Amino acid sequence: MARSRYAPTPSGYLHAGNLANFERVRRWMDELHGEVLLRIDDMDGPRARPDYMERIFVDLEQAGLTWGLGPRTPEEHLANYSQRLRLGEYKQALLDWGGSELLYLCSCSRKDKVCSCRDNRLSKAELPVALEVLEAGASQRKYALKIKVEDSIEVVWKDKEMGLVCLDLSKELGDFVIWRKDGIPAYQWVSLLEDSWQSITHIVRGEDLLTSTAAQLHLSKLCGLEFRQVQFWHHELLCDEQGRKLSKSVQSS
C-alpha cells in the first residue's frame, strides 16, 4: 500500500508553505488509496517549544488535513513517537552500517575553506570510539561526523513534477554531516532511517530539498536501504510578491 507522511518540525508555527505541501500529500494518497502518517521531526529538541507542538495538531485539524497513522495529540507524540526516544536506535543503525570507510570526524567550521580532516576516514572498528569522542566533546561542539562525497557522484531519480532529475552531489552539496557537533544525529540520517523504518513509499517536498533527496538516496545506496524505491514529488515553493519564499505563520496572533 502507498504511504506518505506529514513531517512538520516544532521549531516554529506552521506556515502556508507547510500546509500547501501537506495538501499535496493528502491529495496524492487519496488518488492512490494510500495512508498518511503524521511524523513530527523533533530531534532538534532545543529549538522545539510546547506551543509549537500543540499548534501543529490545531492547524492540521483546521485545514482539514487528516491522517491515519501516528500521534493524535501532543502528549501521545511525546510519550510514544518522539524521535528523542530513538536516539540509541539511530546510533546503532550507524554502527551496524559502519560507514563504508567514508566517515570522518571534522573539527572545521563553515569559515574554513579547506578541510584537512576528510582524509582521516574511519574504519568500522574505529567508528564506536569516534562516536565516543564526538559525544564527549558535544558540550563544546568540537567535532561533527561527516561523510565524504567522492567527486562526480551523480544521483538520478524520476520526479512526479520535475521529470528526470540528475544532481551532481559532490558539486551541489559536497561532504555532509551525519552526526552533529551538539551530539545528536543530523537530519539527513534521521529522516532516511525514519522513512525506511516507517515504510514510506511516496514523499512530497519543496524544490529547496532536492539536495536532501539526493543525499538520502546516496546514503540509502551505501546502506542498502529500501529508500531507493520511494517516489518523489518536488514542487515549487510559495513566494510573496517580491519572490521571496513564503514562510508566514498561519498563527494569527
Image (cartoon, grey):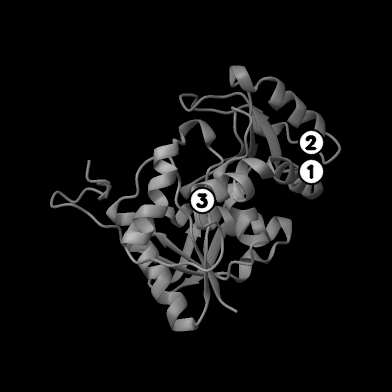
Q: Residue furthest top?
A: 140
Dots 3 and 1: beta carbons under 8 Å? no
124 horizontally vs 151: left or right: right
Q: Give the mark, 3 or 2, whose residue is nearer the N terminus.
A: 3
Disc 3 vs disc 2: which is toward the camera?
3
* Local secondary structure at mark 3: loop
Q: Position of residue 90 (x, y in %)?
A: 70, 45
Q: Give the answer, above or below, for where 245 lies relative to 130.
A: below
Give the residue pinned by disc 2: 127
Q: Residue at x 42, y 53 (%)?
A: 57
Amino acid type at mark 3 = Ile
Q: Residue at x 46, y 33 (%)?
A: 47
Question: What is the C-alpha distance between the residues marked 3 and 1?
Answer: 25 Å
Dots 3 and 2: beta carbons under 8 Å? no
Q: Where on the picture, by quarter, is residue 186?
A: top right
109 horizontally vs 1: left or right: left
Q: Give the mark, 1 or 2, whose residue is nearer the N terminus.
A: 1
> Which is nearer the eye, 35 or 185?
35
Q: Give the mark, 3 or 1, whose residue is nearer the N terminus.
A: 3
> Which is nearer the eye, 69 or 165?
69
Q: Where on the picture, by quarter, is residue 204?
A: bottom left
Question: What is the C-alpha distance between the residues marked 3 and 2?
Answer: 29 Å
Give the residue pinned by disc 3: 40
Q: Position of residue 66 (x, y in %)?
A: 43, 67
Q: Position of residue 17 (x, y in %)?
A: 31, 55
Question: What is the C-alpha distance between the residues marked 1 and 2?
Answer: 7 Å
Amino acid type at mark 2 = Leu
Q: Which mark is residue 95?
A: 1
> In what quadrant of the picture does the C terminus appear?
top left
> Which is nearer the eye, 53 or 94?
53
Disc 3 vs disc 1: which is toward the camera?
3
Dots 1 and 2: beta carbons under 8 Å? yes
